[in-house]
Amino acid sequence: MKKFAVIGQPIKHSLSPRIHSEFAKELGIDISYEAIEIAPKDFNSATKQLLENGYDGLNVTLPLKELAYSLADEVSQIGRESGAVNTLWKEKGKIFADSTDGKGLVEDLLNNQISLKDSNLVILGAGGAARSILPSVLSLHPKRLTLLNRTFEKSRALVDQFKASGVQIQALPMEEIPEGSLTGVINTTSAGVIGEDLILNQRIFQKADWSYDLNYSKETTYFNQLAKDAGIEVCLDGLGMLVGQAAISFKIWTGKRPSTNRVLNLIKSSL
Ligand code: ATR
């Protein structure tokens, strides 16, 4: 039996054990998958111990993704560009790491018939979540990508990091609106979830075809409600991305790719 876990703090409410158990059931693979709480100060020793003591793979969630990146011996290119990873495994005595969040997002967009090629996109936020999706989003060649963030310096630093991507990428202050009609707005901020309002120019929604909130909830998320109220009809939340990134991790560890639709519907109905 293969043995996996998701590590983070807090971790009690993680949906990953359920998602991976469903994948394993579907593919007829015998696995165990636990949720293990690890504090940042214990991360290095606890994680090495798990990987040395029979765990075939670990998913890593907040606030440990950057620490996981630093711990790993070999990191995928996307992981390096993200500066954070969510998937660890051991091979030939080394710790390997990858970041599957961005790929999970773009797969979910494709599943919803949304193409990023030649799009005029906005990403709200410039923290760890924004950085982790940027390599995958840019690889699909949007025409222009605008980063809006409350702390302008942080979005400018991200633009600097990714300016060689070949995509026209710019940072603007949060209240500003990029030129032209927008294809979509992706929210990576935690505003709303942490009880604070998201201060942005509501006119941004009038110019967009769709919104995608990396957050998810049983009801419409705070951000998607803002988008809906402004008339956007296609409002997606991050549950599809969560299941998508899990499926890619599962494939890395087992070589087998689970399908995501059934599990996504199952998880959605159990929220
Ligand atoms: P994560 O890893 O989830 O991205 P993070 O690195 O702490 O977490 O980044 C949180 C992001 O949400 C940041 O872009 C933050 O803006 P600042 O850089 O100005 O802090 C953004 N954010 C959080 N609360 C916000 C709010 N109420 N309004 C606007 N942006 C907010």
Image: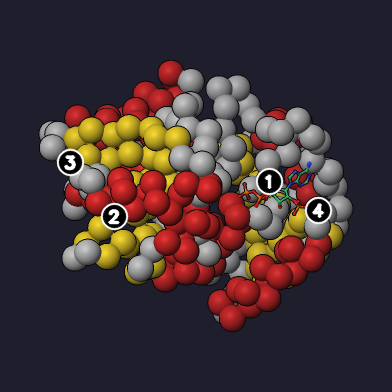
In this figure, which residue is indicated by the disc labeled 1? 189
Position of residue 42 in the picture relative to residue 20 (left or right): right
Position of residue 212 in the picture relative to residue 98 (left or right): right
Question: Is residue 211 depicted above or below 182 in this figure?
Answer: above
Q: Could you give the CA–CA distance between mark 4 and mark 2, rounded to whole angstroms?
A: 36 Å
Name the amino acid, label 1: Thr
Residue 2: give its label. 3
**Crowdedness near tag 4: few (<14), some (14–19) or many (≥20) residues, C-alpha within 10 Å:** some
Q: Is residue 77 visible?
A: yes
| Of the image marks 1 and 4, the number of the one nearer the N terminus | 4
| Of the image marks 1 and 2, the number of the one nearer the N terminus | 2
Position of residue 31 in the picture relative to residue 249 (left or right): left
Q: Residue furthest top?
A: 270
Q: Is residue 115 visible?
A: no
Marks 3 and 4 close (CB-CB < 8 Å): no
Q: Give 225 or 128, whichever is nearer the viewer.
A: 128
Marks 1 and 4 close (CB-CB < 8 Å): yes
Tag 4, which secondary structure? loop
Question: Is residue 77 depicted above or below 26 in this figure?
Answer: below
In this figure, which residue is indicated by the disc labeled 4? 150
Image coordinates for residue 224, horizontal then vertical, percent: 67, 35
Disc 1: residue Cβ within 8 A of ligand 1's nearest atom: yes
Disc 2: residue Cβ within 8 A of ligand 1's nearest atom: no
